[in-house]
Image: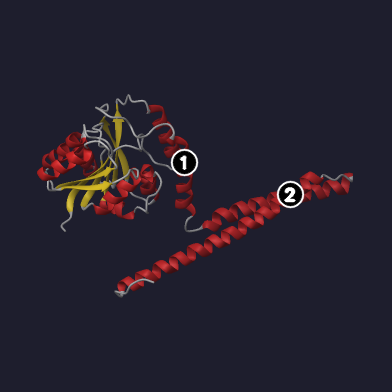
Amino acid sequence: MNELEISVVVPARNEETTIAQVVERSFQAFASLKCSGEVLVVNDGSTDRTAVILVELQRAYPSLRVFTHRRSQGMTAGLQKMFGASRGKIVILIPADMESDPLLDVPTLVRYMQQHDLDVVAGWRQGRKDGKVLASAIYNFVMRTLANVPVHDGNWIKAMRREVIESLPPLRSDWHRFILMIAVHQGFRLDEVQTDYKPRMAGSSKFGWERIPKSFLDVLVLKFLLTFSQAPMRFFGGLGMAGMLLSLLTFVYLTVLYIFTDTQQRPVFIAAGILAVISVLLFLVGFLAELIVNQGERISVLEKRLADNGEDGP
């Protein structure tokens, strides 16, 4: 199949009021850019008329590709499927609720990417007035400070080159929120461009405050994996060394205290001993993690060799 210039991916769940506009205005955006394009939609377990409308749209737009989840599997699963199926040189994530107008935002993202020779462009909502402004501000603050993502609105529309999509690891949980974090870690060039915000026309948001604790934990997990997945001993061994040093200093202090004052502090002695044992266990965990990583790399090399030779894997 020939590679297209743009793929617009749209996760949709119960968006019967707006999904037709999103699809139609995406194809109008391709026409305004004078380029070829496709629209991919995942119908994520919708219980309204979203599925019926998508069938009707496919008759009018042959380049509309629809994937259906019989039950809701979440936005990450939908994006994973669409990313893998997309053929565009540039892949653009657009919501199905018309808070982002594809006819305006798709050309804005594409032109900014081409003018500044970028790999990723994130949209920055202007005039946003929904009920999630504070939650979004907390999220973006964490992303800027902990993950070094230099944008103001990391969980909004974004355009990515094919190389970025192909470099993404398997996404799980709500990791679609951290695509920019992964891209920055891998060294892709990233910037943001201002886009207009349009209040939701109908329906309700699928995300709320309850996701903040989950997202914070996911950030920590992903940060750990990106930093230490290939060298876990640096993490576990570092903690072990710090624990051993603290335990050793405590034992030295207790020894000096006993020699010069004939005083014993058994609770502190026991705590230092427990810390020493925990530190040794951290070293052992680090060694085991290194063995797992090493075996994983060996398996990957073996699978690559078998694939190059045209043989099936084990």
Residue 160 is situated, as x and y percent measured from the top left of the image, at 27, 47
Query: Image point 64% across, 57% down: which residue?
Result: 281
The disc labelled 1 sits on which kind of residue?
Answer: Leu
- Residue 58 image offset from top left, x and y in percent: 14, 45
| Residue of label 2 | 272
| Residues packed near mark 1 inside 10 Å, few (<14), some (14 to 19) or many (20 plus) | few
Element class at badge 1 = helix
Q: Position of residue 115 (x, y in %)?
A: 22, 42
Picture residue at 48% right of the left edge, 42% below the top: 217
- Tell which of 290 and 21 is nearer to you: 21
- Residue type pointed to by label 2: Ala
Label 2 and label 1: CA atoms lie apart by 32 Å
Q: Quadrant of the C terminus?
A: bottom left
Circle 2 packing at 10 Å, graded few (<14), some (14-19), many (20+), is many
The numbered dot on residue 146 is: 1
* 3 lies left or right of 257: left
Q: Is 5 positioned to the left or the right of 192 in the image?
A: left
Mark nearer the viewer, 2 or 1: 2
Report the label total: 2
> Is 78 drawn above or below residue 311 in the view shown?
above
Q: Which quadrant of the structure image shows residue 206?
A: top left
Q: Earlier in the sequence, mark 2 or mark 1?
A: 1
Check the image and tell me how it is coloured.
secondary structure
Q: Quadrant of residue 193?
A: top left
What label does residue 224 carry, if any? none
Nearer-the-camera pick, 206 or 103: 206
For image coordinates 52% across by 57% down, the residue present is 232
127 over 9 or under it: above or below: above
At x 20%, y 39%, the residue is: 106
For the N terminus, the image quarter is bottom left
Looking at the rendered structure, the secondary structure element under dot 2 is: helix
Residue 288 image offset from top left, x and y in percent? 56, 62
